[in-house]
Amino acid sequence: MKTIISTSLMLIVLTWTPARAPAQNLVSQEPPGEINTVPGPQEERWIALSGATLIDGTGNPPIQDSVVLIRGNRITAAGPRTATPVPAGAEVQDVSGLYLLPGLIDAHFHLSNHNLPSLFLQNGVTSIRDPGGAWFDTYDPVLNLDRAIPRIFINGPHIDMFPPAYPSDAVLVRDPMETARTVNRWIDLGASAIKVYFRLSLDLIRVACETAHKRGVPVTAHLEIVPADQAIEAGLDGIEHITSVGSALIPDRAAETYRREMLADNNYRRAGRYRMWESIDLQDPRVSKLLQLMVERGVILSPTLAVFERQANDPKVEEVEARAFQKMVEFTGMAAKAGVKVVVGSHSSVPYAKEGKAYFREMELLVESGLTPMQVIQGATSLNARFFRMSDRLGTIDSGKIADLILIDGNPLKDIRNMRRVQRVMLNGRWVTESE
């Protein structure tokens, strides 16, 4: 009798399967886009921007005396004036003497005040992504402002474990089920990427990556105490902050000490990260090994150098901080030279830039690290569009792309500081006016 009951139970277990949706309904190859509707021109008229030096975001050499044709909100052609016919009836706008670039994309924006997005737009940033910390209703007041704002992409609150570094900006998970459920919910609510935070375990980072990738959505991270190489092998697509890679570049005993101090107190990193970086030997094989892994896996680095900047001539800065920051700068240059894709993320507010200018300070520091101005412009445009998985419509000046454009007075390829000289901004095929 016992054998019959046992066999019956076994049959039930072997033949029962839970109901589930078809697999194709769980997979989306296209991540959610911006959360706001960006106004375009009232009519699909032709515009020809004529005479500017074109820097198209691809890394190709600039084109002097160019023509860019726009119909409605889309670019239809771009090239030398002699090879780009202007349709009859098109409105020709003479932009001679200026430099025409794609609208800038900010990979790491935080909403410190409701006016900041429009201020960034005024400075040529046509797309921003809040990479974790903002709940989905955080931007509602911004969306209701009667002024032009950039395209806004969000990640939703970052995913972390107890005790979080920023309780009001995080959602806490405890196991794989909660992690997968949170990732799917955030994507359903419009998250175009997922951000995992540094107390999340390596196993749950892997679950977050696997879940997001099934939906066609990238995962980026602020790591600190999770070794960057292991997190990359778990599936990360991007790394936020240069400080995220530090613990992978020091001996295991030192990394464990840093981890233990961080687990005891989230704020240990404030000073601890500078002591760590000051101790890093950039000739250590760990450095080249990590860079090779980042290149092989196509990981995108948003170093946000400007938020960590500590200048040696600043009386408030300790020597260890200044030396540590120089190593962060040097590592960033080594990463770019090794082939790591480096993008521009402003962090919105930084120590050595006025409000609204953090993006430019980041670009300047990237050049100081060893990137060429052209590489920095690519990191601000086409590479960031790739990071957002929006390359099909943003990031370059090319036929079929959305007309998010900026005009600069001064050659940024000779001096990246000329990027601060934004003259006009076109968003979705329409010039943004001063009143907006």
Image: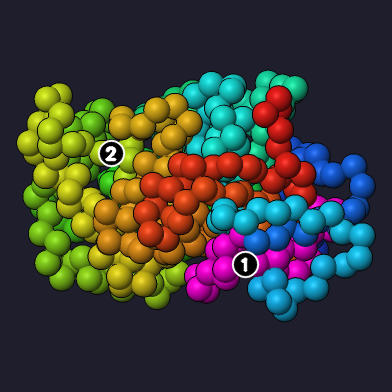
For the residues labelled 1 and 2, the Cα–Cα distance comes to 40 Å
Q: Amino acid at mark 1?
A: Asp
Which residue lies at the image location 46% right of the left edge and 56% below the top edge? 411
The residue lying toward the viewer, choosing from 201 and 403, is: 403
Q: For mark 1, what is the residue?
A: 65
Which residue is the site of mark 2? 308
Instruction: Classify residue 141 by image quadrant.
Output: top right
Residues tagged 1 and 2 counted as in contact (Cβ below 8 A): no
Where does the N terminus fall, quadrant-wise?
Answer: bottom right
- Label 2 sits on a secondary structure element that is helix
User: Horizontal placement of 232 versus 243: left or right?
Assistant: right
Residue reaching furthest bottom?
83
Callout 2 amino acid: Phe
Residue 71: x %, y % from top left? 84, 58
Does the magenta segment cover residue 204?
Answer: no
Q: What's the residue at 33%, 37% (across, down)?
A: 307
Q: Residue at x 52, y 74 (%)?
A: 60
- Asked if residue 305 shows in the view, the reply is yes
Which range is magenta? 52-79
